[in-house]
Image: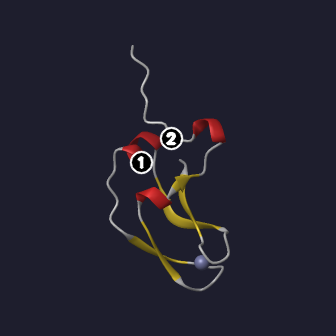
Amino acid sequence: MPEILIRCPITGRDVHTGIALAADVFLHTEFETHPVACPYCGARHSWSKKDAYMQFPPERTPSASRKEPH
Ligand SMILES: [Zn+2]
């Protein structure tokens, strides 16, 4: 299952949120702000859905909300 990552604003490194969701669940889930303890800079980063991305190959990035008509 793909994991949700955010980017540390201080170090620019990928921070694991510890949350893993299926892509379609991620797309349809409204996230509240989740602070995550950053292992790189030691701060807690608040993130929301727009900051989050999934650990996918680029072609699987679920940013395109288009759906192919059947
Ligand atoms: Zn950080």
The structure residue drawn at horizontal position 40% and vertical position 44%, both measured from the top left corner, is: 27
Q: How far from the left and from the top, in percent, is residue 66?
A: 43, 30
> Is 19 left or right of 59, judged from the image as shown?
left
Q: How far from the left and from the top, in percent, is residue 24?
A: 42, 40
Q: Earlier in the sequence, mark 1 or mark 2?
A: 1
Residues 55 and 59: in front is: 59
Q: How far from the left and from the top, in percent, is residue 67?
A: 42, 26
Numbered disc 2: secondary structure: loop
> Is 12 left or right of 33, judged from the image as shown?
right
Amino acid type assigned to the residue bearing label 2 in the image: Pro
> Is 57 left or right of 49, judged from the image as shown?
right
Mark 2, Cα crowd under 10 Å, few <14 / some 14-19 / many 20+, is some
The structure residue drawn at horizontal position 34% and vertical position 44%, both measured from the top left corner, is: 28
Numbered disc 1: secondary structure: helix
The verdict on label 2 being within 8 Å of ligand 1 is no
Residues 1 and 48: in front is: 48
The verdict on label 1 being within 8 Å of ligand 1 is no
The structure residue drawn at horizontal position 36% and vertical position 69%, both measured from the top left corner, is: 33
**Residue tagged 1:** 26
Q: How far from the left and from the top, in percent, is residue 3?
A: 54, 55
Mark 1, Cα crowd under 10 Å, few <14 / some 14-19 / many 20+, is some
The structure residue drawn at horizontal position 45% and vertical position 50%, both measured from the top left corner, is: 21
**Residue tagged 2:** 62
> Is 13 left or right of 17, judged from the image as shown?
right
> Could you say which disc has been placed on residue 12 in the image?
none
Q: Pointer 1 and pointer 2: residues touching (CB < 8 Å)?
A: yes
Query: Where is residue 61, by image quadrant?
Result: top right
Q: Residue furthest top?
A: 70
Q: Which numbered mark, 1 or 2, is in the foreground of this view?
A: 2
Amino acid type assigned to the residue bearing label 1 in the image: Phe
